[in-house]
Amino acid sequence: MTYGPVVRPAADPIRAFTPERRTIRGTAVSDTLAPAWARGPLRPFRFRQYRCLAASITFELAAAGVWLIALVWQVIELRGGPGNLSFVASGTALGLVLTVLVGGVAADRIPQRRVMVAVTVVRVAVTAVVSALALAGLVTFWHLALAGLVLGLASGFYFPAYSAILPSVVDADDLLAANGMEGVLRPVMMNAAGPALASLVVAAWSPAWAFVLVLALEVGCLLTILLLHPVPLRRDLVADDTHPVRAAAADLVIGFRYMVSTPWLLATLLFASAMVLVVIGPLEVLVPFVIKDQAGGDATDHAWVLAAFGLGGAAASLLMASIRMPRRYLTIMVAMWGAACLPMAVVGFATSVPLIAAALLITGALFSAPTVIWGTLLQRRVPAELLGRVSSLDFFVSLAFMPVSMALAGAVGELIGLKATFLVAGVAPIFLAVAAIALARMPVDEIDHPLG
Protein backbone atom coordinates (compact mmCIF):
# COMPACT_ATOMS: atom_id res chain seq x y z
CA MET A 1 0.00 0.00 0.00
CA THR A 2 1.39 3.40 -0.97
CA TYR A 3 0.61 6.59 0.96
CA GLY A 4 1.67 9.55 -1.17
CA PRO A 5 4.43 10.40 -3.62
CA VAL A 6 7.35 10.58 -1.18
CA VAL A 7 7.12 6.91 -0.18
CA ARG A 8 8.01 3.97 -2.42
CA PRO A 9 7.93 0.83 -0.26
CA ALA A 10 9.73 -2.31 -1.28
CA ALA A 11 7.61 -5.11 -2.67
CA ASP A 12 7.89 -6.92 0.66
CA PRO A 13 9.39 -4.42 3.14
CA ILE A 14 9.63 -6.84 6.05
CA ARG A 15 11.60 -9.46 4.10
CA ALA A 16 13.58 -6.83 2.22
CA PHE A 17 15.10 -5.20 5.28
CA THR A 18 15.01 -7.63 8.20
CA PRO A 19 17.23 -10.58 9.15
CA GLU A 20 14.56 -12.95 7.75
CA ARG A 21 17.11 -13.27 4.93
CA ARG A 22 19.39 -14.86 7.53
CA THR A 23 22.14 -12.29 6.92
CA ILE A 24 23.07 -9.23 8.91
CA ARG A 25 25.85 -7.12 7.42
CA GLY A 26 26.95 -10.16 5.40
CA THR A 27 27.07 -12.57 8.35
CA ALA A 28 24.90 -15.65 8.03
CA VAL A 29 22.55 -16.27 10.91
CA SER A 30 20.65 -19.48 11.50
CA ASP A 31 18.51 -20.70 14.35
CA THR A 32 20.17 -24.09 14.06
CA LEU A 33 23.60 -22.53 14.57
CA ALA A 34 22.57 -20.41 17.54
CA PRO A 35 24.31 -21.16 20.86
CA ALA A 36 22.46 -23.37 23.31
CA TRP A 37 21.58 -20.48 25.61
CA ALA A 38 19.94 -18.47 22.79
CA ARG A 39 16.59 -20.19 23.08
CA GLY A 40 13.14 -19.11 24.21
CA PRO A 41 13.01 -15.49 25.38
CA LEU A 42 16.80 -15.14 24.93
CA ARG A 43 16.82 -16.03 21.23
CA PRO A 44 17.15 -12.40 19.98
CA PHE A 45 20.52 -12.19 21.80
CA ARG A 46 22.12 -14.42 19.15
CA PHE A 47 22.31 -11.26 17.00
CA ARG A 48 25.24 -8.99 17.87
CA GLN A 49 23.25 -5.95 16.74
CA TYR A 50 20.47 -6.77 19.18
CA ARG A 51 22.94 -7.27 22.03
CA CYS A 52 24.27 -3.74 21.47
CA LEU A 53 20.74 -2.33 21.24
CA ALA A 54 19.65 -4.17 24.39
CA ALA A 55 22.71 -2.91 26.27
CA SER A 56 21.96 0.69 25.30
CA ILE A 57 18.32 0.51 26.35
CA THR A 58 19.40 -1.14 29.62
CA PHE A 59 21.60 1.84 30.48
CA GLU A 60 18.90 4.30 29.43
CA LEU A 61 16.14 2.62 31.47
CA ALA A 62 18.38 2.43 34.53
CA ALA A 63 19.15 6.14 34.13
CA ALA A 64 15.41 6.90 33.98
CA GLY A 65 14.84 4.93 37.18
CA VAL A 66 17.62 6.71 39.03
CA TRP A 67 16.39 10.08 37.72
CA LEU A 68 12.90 9.43 39.09
CA ILE A 69 14.13 8.81 42.66
CA ALA A 70 16.69 11.62 42.50
CA LEU A 71 14.03 14.05 41.28
CA VAL A 72 11.47 13.15 43.96
CA TRP A 73 13.88 13.39 46.85
CA GLN A 74 15.60 16.49 45.51
CA VAL A 75 12.17 18.17 45.53
CA ILE A 76 11.57 16.96 49.08
CA GLU A 77 15.05 18.16 50.11
CA LEU A 78 14.08 21.58 48.73
CA ARG A 79 10.99 21.41 51.02
CA GLY A 80 8.62 20.96 48.09
CA GLY A 81 5.21 19.28 48.18
CA PRO A 82 2.95 17.48 45.66
CA GLY A 83 2.38 20.68 43.69
CA ASN A 84 6.11 21.28 43.30
CA LEU A 85 6.68 17.68 42.24
CA SER A 86 3.86 17.93 39.69
CA PHE A 87 5.49 21.06 38.24
CA VAL A 88 8.93 19.46 38.04
CA ALA A 89 7.83 16.04 36.79
CA SER A 90 5.46 17.34 34.11
CA GLY A 91 8.37 18.90 32.22
CA THR A 92 9.59 15.53 30.95
CA ALA A 93 6.15 14.46 29.79
CA LEU A 94 5.57 17.82 28.09
CA GLY A 95 8.87 17.61 26.23
CA LEU A 96 8.06 14.11 25.01
CA VAL A 97 4.66 15.18 23.68
CA LEU A 98 6.12 18.24 21.93
CA THR A 99 8.69 16.35 19.86
CA VAL A 100 7.51 12.78 19.48
CA LEU A 101 5.66 13.42 16.19
CA VAL A 102 8.73 15.03 14.66
CA GLY A 103 10.76 12.18 16.12
CA GLY A 104 8.63 9.67 14.24
CA VAL A 105 9.20 11.45 10.93
CA ALA A 106 12.92 11.59 11.69
CA ALA A 107 12.99 7.86 12.45
CA ASP A 108 11.54 7.14 9.00
CA ARG A 109 13.85 9.59 7.18
CA ILE A 110 17.16 9.53 9.09
CA PRO A 111 19.16 6.39 10.01
CA GLN A 112 17.87 5.52 13.47
CA ARG A 113 21.32 4.90 14.95
CA ARG A 114 22.29 8.48 14.08
CA VAL A 115 19.16 9.81 15.82
CA MET A 116 19.85 7.75 18.95
CA VAL A 117 23.45 8.94 19.16
CA ALA A 118 22.46 12.61 18.82
CA VAL A 119 19.77 12.56 21.49
CA THR A 120 21.95 10.61 23.91
CA VAL A 121 24.67 13.25 23.59
CA VAL A 122 22.03 15.83 24.55
CA ARG A 123 21.00 13.79 27.59
CA VAL A 124 24.62 13.45 28.71
CA ALA A 125 25.04 17.23 28.54
CA VAL A 126 21.81 17.95 30.45
CA THR A 127 22.52 15.48 33.25
CA ALA A 128 26.04 16.85 33.57
CA VAL A 129 24.66 20.37 34.15
CA VAL A 130 22.05 19.17 36.67
CA SER A 131 24.68 17.14 38.55
CA ALA A 132 26.98 20.16 38.81
CA LEU A 133 24.19 22.44 40.03
CA ALA A 134 22.97 19.92 42.58
CA LEU A 135 26.46 19.23 43.94
CA ALA A 136 27.01 22.98 44.29
CA GLY A 137 23.71 23.40 46.15
CA LEU A 138 22.39 25.76 43.48
CA VAL A 139 19.66 23.61 41.91
CA THR A 140 16.08 24.97 41.98
CA PHE A 141 12.63 23.72 40.96
CA TRP A 142 12.97 25.66 37.71
CA HIS A 143 16.30 24.00 36.92
CA LEU A 144 14.79 20.54 37.46
CA ALA A 145 11.71 21.35 35.37
CA LEU A 146 13.80 22.76 32.50
CA ALA A 147 16.15 19.76 32.58
CA GLY A 148 13.17 17.41 32.52
CA LEU A 149 11.72 19.30 29.56
CA VAL A 150 14.94 18.91 27.55
CA LEU A 151 15.20 15.23 28.47
CA GLY A 152 11.60 14.77 27.34
CA LEU A 153 12.34 16.55 24.06
CA ALA A 154 15.22 14.13 23.50
CA SER A 155 13.07 11.10 24.38
CA GLY A 156 10.58 12.18 21.72
CA PHE A 157 13.26 11.33 19.14
CA TYR A 158 14.83 8.37 20.92
CA PHE A 159 11.91 6.00 21.37
CA PRO A 160 10.47 6.14 17.82
CA ALA A 161 13.99 5.50 16.52
CA TYR A 162 14.37 2.53 18.87
CA SER A 163 10.99 1.09 17.81
CA ALA A 164 11.82 1.54 14.13
CA ILE A 165 15.29 0.00 14.31
CA LEU A 166 14.30 -3.13 16.23
CA PRO A 167 12.73 -5.06 13.28
CA SER A 168 15.97 -4.46 11.34
CA VAL A 169 18.18 -6.29 13.84
CA VAL A 170 16.13 -9.43 14.66
CA ASP A 171 14.00 -11.92 12.76
CA ALA A 172 10.29 -11.17 12.43
CA ASP A 173 9.57 -14.37 14.37
CA ASP A 174 11.75 -13.07 17.22
CA LEU A 175 9.95 -9.74 17.64
CA LEU A 176 7.66 -10.99 20.41
CA ALA A 177 10.68 -12.28 22.33
CA ALA A 178 12.61 -9.04 21.72
CA ASN A 179 9.68 -6.92 22.91
CA GLY A 180 9.30 -9.29 25.83
CA MET A 181 12.93 -8.79 26.80
CA GLU A 182 12.44 -5.03 26.61
CA GLY A 183 9.39 -5.57 28.78
CA VAL A 184 11.66 -7.34 31.28
CA LEU A 185 14.42 -4.75 31.11
CA ARG A 186 12.10 -1.76 31.39
CA PRO A 187 10.57 -2.59 34.80
CA VAL A 188 13.69 -4.28 36.20
CA MET A 189 15.97 -1.37 35.36
CA MET A 190 13.55 1.58 35.54
CA ASN A 191 11.41 0.42 38.46
CA ALA A 192 13.71 -1.90 40.42
CA ALA A 193 17.47 -1.69 39.87
CA GLY A 194 17.60 2.02 39.02
CA PRO A 195 15.48 3.17 41.98
CA ALA A 196 17.28 0.74 44.31
CA LEU A 197 20.67 2.16 43.35
CA ALA A 198 19.32 5.69 43.63
CA SER A 199 17.83 5.11 47.08
CA LEU A 200 21.14 3.75 48.32
CA VAL A 201 22.96 6.80 46.97
CA VAL A 202 20.37 9.21 48.40
CA ALA A 203 20.46 7.51 51.80
CA ALA A 204 24.26 7.39 51.90
CA TRP A 205 24.97 10.82 50.42
CA SER A 206 22.33 13.03 48.77
CA PRO A 207 20.07 13.35 45.70
CA ALA A 208 22.88 15.30 44.03
CA TRP A 209 25.04 12.19 43.86
CA ALA A 210 22.11 10.27 42.40
CA PHE A 211 22.14 12.77 39.53
CA VAL A 212 25.83 11.95 39.05
CA LEU A 213 24.85 8.29 38.75
CA VAL A 214 22.33 9.26 36.06
CA LEU A 215 25.17 10.96 34.16
CA ALA A 216 27.34 7.82 34.33
CA LEU A 217 24.50 5.65 33.02
CA GLU A 218 23.80 8.03 30.14
CA VAL A 219 27.46 7.84 29.15
CA GLY A 220 27.17 4.04 29.18
CA CYS A 221 24.12 4.30 26.91
CA LEU A 222 26.04 6.47 24.45
CA LEU A 223 29.02 4.11 24.31
CA THR A 224 26.87 1.05 23.60
CA ILE A 225 24.92 2.82 20.85
CA LEU A 226 28.25 3.67 19.20
CA LEU A 227 28.99 -0.08 19.10
CA LEU A 228 25.85 -0.62 17.01
CA HIS A 229 26.57 -0.95 13.27
CA PRO A 230 24.69 1.48 10.99
CA VAL A 231 21.34 0.08 9.83
CA PRO A 232 19.73 1.05 6.47
CA LEU A 233 16.33 2.72 6.45
CA ARG A 234 13.40 0.37 5.86
CA ARG A 235 12.00 2.61 3.12
CA ASP A 236 13.05 4.21 -0.15
CA LEU A 237 12.94 8.02 -0.35
CA VAL A 238 12.07 9.28 -3.81
CA ALA A 239 14.32 12.13 -4.90
CA ASP A 240 12.25 15.21 -5.73
CA ASP A 241 12.38 18.96 -5.26
CA THR A 242 9.90 19.04 -2.35
CA HIS A 243 11.00 21.33 0.47
CA PRO A 244 12.17 19.22 3.48
CA VAL A 245 9.61 20.82 5.79
CA ARG A 246 6.76 20.14 3.35
CA ALA A 247 8.00 16.59 2.83
CA ALA A 248 8.13 15.99 6.59
CA ALA A 249 4.63 17.47 6.99
CA ALA A 250 3.37 15.18 4.21
CA ASP A 251 4.93 12.21 5.99
CA LEU A 252 3.15 13.19 9.19
CA VAL A 253 -0.21 13.54 7.41
CA ILE A 254 0.23 10.07 5.92
CA GLY A 255 0.83 8.66 9.40
CA PHE A 256 -2.30 10.39 10.75
CA ARG A 257 -4.39 9.04 7.88
CA TYR A 258 -3.20 5.53 8.58
CA MET A 259 -4.00 5.87 12.28
CA VAL A 260 -7.51 7.26 11.73
CA SER A 261 -8.34 4.64 9.08
CA THR A 262 -7.22 1.70 11.25
CA PRO A 263 -9.92 1.03 13.90
CA TRP A 264 -7.90 -1.22 16.23
CA LEU A 265 -5.04 1.29 16.27
CA LEU A 266 -7.20 4.39 16.79
CA ALA A 267 -9.36 2.79 19.51
CA THR A 268 -6.34 1.52 21.44
CA LEU A 269 -4.62 4.89 21.33
CA LEU A 270 -7.73 6.78 22.44
CA PHE A 271 -8.22 4.30 25.28
CA ALA A 272 -4.59 4.72 26.30
CA SER A 273 -4.97 8.52 26.28
CA ALA A 274 -7.90 8.40 28.68
CA MET A 275 -6.17 5.83 30.88
CA VAL A 276 -3.03 7.93 31.09
CA LEU A 277 -5.08 10.99 32.09
CA VAL A 278 -6.55 9.29 35.15
CA VAL A 279 -3.67 6.97 36.12
CA ILE A 280 -0.22 8.39 35.44
CA GLY A 281 -0.48 11.47 37.63
CA PRO A 282 -1.46 9.54 40.78
CA LEU A 283 1.10 6.84 40.03
CA GLU A 284 4.03 9.18 39.41
CA VAL A 285 3.22 12.12 41.69
CA LEU A 286 1.01 10.92 44.56
CA VAL A 287 2.44 7.48 45.39
CA PRO A 288 5.57 8.99 47.05
CA PHE A 289 3.32 11.05 49.34
CA VAL A 290 1.13 8.04 50.18
CA ILE A 291 4.31 6.25 51.19
CA LYS A 292 5.62 9.19 53.20
CA ASP A 293 2.41 10.52 54.81
CA GLN A 294 0.17 7.45 55.17
CA ALA A 295 2.71 4.66 55.54
CA GLY A 296 5.53 6.60 57.23
CA GLY A 297 8.05 5.55 54.58
CA ASP A 298 11.16 7.15 53.11
CA ALA A 299 13.25 7.01 49.93
CA THR A 300 14.18 3.37 50.55
CA ASP A 301 10.53 2.38 50.90
CA HIS A 302 9.72 4.30 47.73
CA ALA A 303 12.40 2.29 45.95
CA TRP A 304 10.95 -0.98 47.28
CA VAL A 305 7.49 -0.05 45.99
CA LEU A 306 8.87 0.82 42.56
CA ALA A 307 10.86 -2.43 42.62
CA ALA A 308 7.67 -4.40 43.28
CA PHE A 309 5.98 -2.64 40.35
CA GLY A 310 8.98 -3.39 38.16
CA LEU A 311 9.41 -7.02 39.18
CA GLY A 312 5.75 -7.72 38.50
CA GLY A 313 6.18 -6.24 35.06
CA ALA A 314 9.39 -8.17 34.43
CA ALA A 315 7.84 -11.50 35.35
CA ALA A 316 4.82 -10.89 33.11
CA SER A 317 7.00 -9.73 30.22
CA LEU A 318 9.25 -12.77 30.53
CA LEU A 319 6.18 -14.98 30.37
CA MET A 320 4.94 -13.20 27.25
CA ALA A 321 8.38 -13.52 25.64
CA SER A 322 8.24 -17.29 26.15
CA ILE A 323 4.91 -17.96 24.45
CA ARG A 324 3.25 -17.39 21.10
CA MET A 325 1.12 -14.39 20.29
CA PRO A 326 -2.36 -15.00 21.78
CA ARG A 327 -5.11 -15.67 19.27
CA ARG A 328 -7.29 -12.99 20.90
CA TYR A 329 -4.41 -10.58 21.10
CA LEU A 330 -6.40 -7.31 20.84
CA THR A 331 -9.08 -8.25 23.36
CA ILE A 332 -6.58 -9.67 25.86
CA MET A 333 -4.28 -6.66 25.50
CA VAL A 334 -6.89 -3.96 26.17
CA ALA A 335 -8.70 -5.96 28.87
CA MET A 336 -5.45 -6.49 30.78
CA TRP A 337 -4.61 -2.79 30.65
CA GLY A 338 -8.01 -1.95 32.07
CA ALA A 339 -7.72 -4.54 34.85
CA ALA A 340 -4.17 -3.37 35.66
CA CYS A 341 -5.49 -0.15 37.17
CA LEU A 342 -7.88 -1.74 39.66
CA PRO A 343 -5.22 -2.45 42.36
CA MET A 344 -4.46 1.28 42.43
CA ALA A 345 -7.74 1.78 44.29
CA VAL A 346 -6.09 -0.11 47.16
CA VAL A 347 -3.10 2.24 47.20
CA GLY A 348 -5.13 5.26 48.27
CA PHE A 349 -6.39 3.42 51.37
CA ALA A 350 -3.11 1.69 52.24
CA THR A 351 -1.27 2.50 55.47
CA SER A 352 1.63 0.09 55.05
CA VAL A 353 4.43 -0.12 52.51
CA PRO A 354 4.02 -3.90 51.91
CA LEU A 355 0.36 -3.42 50.94
CA ILE A 356 1.25 -0.62 48.51
CA ALA A 357 4.02 -2.77 47.04
CA ALA A 358 1.70 -5.77 46.63
CA ALA A 359 -0.92 -3.70 44.84
CA LEU A 360 1.61 -2.19 42.46
CA LEU A 361 3.21 -5.60 41.85
CA ILE A 362 -0.08 -6.71 40.30
CA THR A 363 -0.47 -3.42 38.43
CA GLY A 364 3.05 -3.74 37.00
CA ALA A 365 2.40 -7.27 35.77
CA LEU A 366 -0.89 -6.39 34.09
CA PHE A 367 0.59 -3.25 32.50
CA SER A 368 3.67 -4.94 31.06
CA ALA A 369 2.25 -8.14 29.58
CA PRO A 370 -0.05 -6.35 27.10
CA THR A 371 2.70 -3.85 26.31
CA VAL A 372 4.73 -6.73 24.87
CA ILE A 373 1.76 -7.66 22.68
CA TRP A 374 1.36 -4.02 21.61
CA GLY A 375 4.96 -3.55 20.49
CA THR A 376 4.88 -6.77 18.48
CA LEU A 377 1.48 -5.90 17.04
CA LEU A 378 2.78 -2.60 15.67
CA GLN A 379 5.87 -4.23 14.18
CA ARG A 380 3.84 -7.02 12.56
CA ARG A 381 0.76 -5.18 11.27
CA VAL A 382 2.01 -1.65 10.49
CA PRO A 383 3.77 -1.22 7.11
CA ALA A 384 7.53 -1.01 7.59
CA GLU A 385 7.83 2.39 5.92
CA LEU A 386 5.31 3.83 8.41
CA LEU A 387 6.56 2.25 11.60
CA GLY A 388 8.54 5.23 12.89
CA ARG A 389 5.60 7.60 12.40
CA VAL A 390 3.04 5.20 13.85
CA SER A 391 5.32 4.59 16.84
CA SER A 392 5.55 8.34 17.37
CA LEU A 393 1.79 8.69 17.06
CA ASP A 394 1.49 5.93 19.63
CA PHE A 395 3.59 7.97 22.04
CA PHE A 396 1.86 11.24 21.18
CA VAL A 397 -1.77 10.18 21.29
CA SER A 398 -1.45 7.86 24.26
CA LEU A 399 0.78 10.27 26.22
CA ALA A 400 -0.75 13.60 25.21
CA PHE A 401 -2.50 13.82 28.57
CA MET A 402 0.51 12.74 30.62
CA PRO A 403 1.74 16.27 31.42
CA VAL A 404 -1.86 17.28 32.15
CA SER A 405 -2.31 14.30 34.46
CA MET A 406 0.94 14.97 36.28
CA ALA A 407 0.24 18.69 36.56
CA LEU A 408 -3.27 18.07 37.95
CA ALA A 409 -2.43 15.18 40.25
CA GLY A 410 -1.09 17.28 43.09
CA ALA A 411 -4.00 19.74 43.01
CA VAL A 412 -6.64 17.01 42.68
CA GLY A 413 -5.08 14.98 45.48
CA GLU A 414 -5.16 17.98 47.76
CA LEU A 415 -8.72 18.91 46.71
CA ILE A 416 -10.56 15.58 46.99
CA GLY A 417 -8.01 13.57 48.96
CA LEU A 418 -5.71 10.68 48.10
CA LYS A 419 -8.34 7.99 48.67
CA ALA A 420 -10.86 9.42 46.19
CA THR A 421 -8.16 10.16 43.62
CA PHE A 422 -6.81 6.62 43.62
CA LEU A 423 -10.33 5.15 43.59
CA VAL A 424 -11.13 6.96 40.35
CA ALA A 425 -7.76 5.94 38.88
CA GLY A 426 -8.46 2.30 39.71
CA VAL A 427 -12.05 1.97 38.49
CA ALA A 428 -12.50 4.27 35.48
CA PRO A 429 -10.09 2.43 33.09
CA ILE A 430 -12.16 -0.77 33.30
CA PHE A 431 -15.14 0.93 31.66
CA LEU A 432 -12.86 2.61 29.12
CA ALA A 433 -11.39 -0.76 28.12
CA VAL A 434 -14.80 -2.34 27.55
CA ALA A 435 -15.82 0.61 25.37
CA ALA A 436 -12.64 0.39 23.25
CA ILE A 437 -13.03 -3.35 22.64
CA ALA A 438 -16.68 -3.01 21.64
CA LEU A 439 -16.47 0.14 19.49
CA ALA A 440 -13.50 -1.08 17.43
CA ARG A 441 -14.95 -4.61 17.09
CA MET A 442 -11.62 -6.01 18.21
CA PRO A 443 -12.80 -9.65 18.56
CA VAL A 444 -13.69 -9.67 14.85
CA ASP A 445 -10.52 -7.88 13.73
CA GLU A 446 -8.12 -10.19 15.56
CA ILE A 447 -9.72 -13.29 14.04
CA ASP A 448 -9.55 -11.78 10.54
CA HIS A 449 -5.84 -10.91 11.06
CA PRO A 450 -4.19 -13.76 13.01
CA LEU A 451 -0.62 -13.24 14.23
CA GLY A 452 -0.06 -16.55 16.02
Image (spheres, helix red, strand yellow):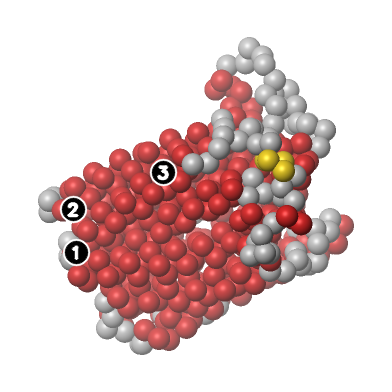
Label 3 to label 1: alpha-carbon separation: 25 Å
For disc 1, the marked residue is: 206
Q: Amino acid at mark 3?
A: Leu
- Kind of residue at disc 1: Ser
Which residue type does callout 2 highlight?
Ala
Is residue 269 found left or right of 74 in the rendered image?
A: right
Nearer the observer, disc 3 or disc 2? 3
Q: Which mark is residue 43?
A: none
How far is mark 1 from mark 2, CA to CA?
9 Å
Q: Are the two marked residues, 1 and 2, in contact with CB atoms closer than 8 angstroms? A: yes
In what element is the residue under mark 3?
helix
Q: Around disc 2, counting alpha carbons within 10 Å, would you say few (fewer than 14), some (14 to 19), or many (20 or more)?
A: many
Mark 2 element type: helix
Q: Which mark is residue 222?
A: 3
> Residue at the spot x=60%, y=42% of the render?
165
Quarter of the view holding residue 336: bottom right
In the image, farthest residue toward the top? 241
Q: Crowdedness of circle 1 by 10 Å Cα count: few (<14), some, many (20+)? A: some
Q: Position of residue 295 (x, y in %)?
A: 31, 84
User: Seen in the image, is 313 located left or right of residue 383?
Assistant: left
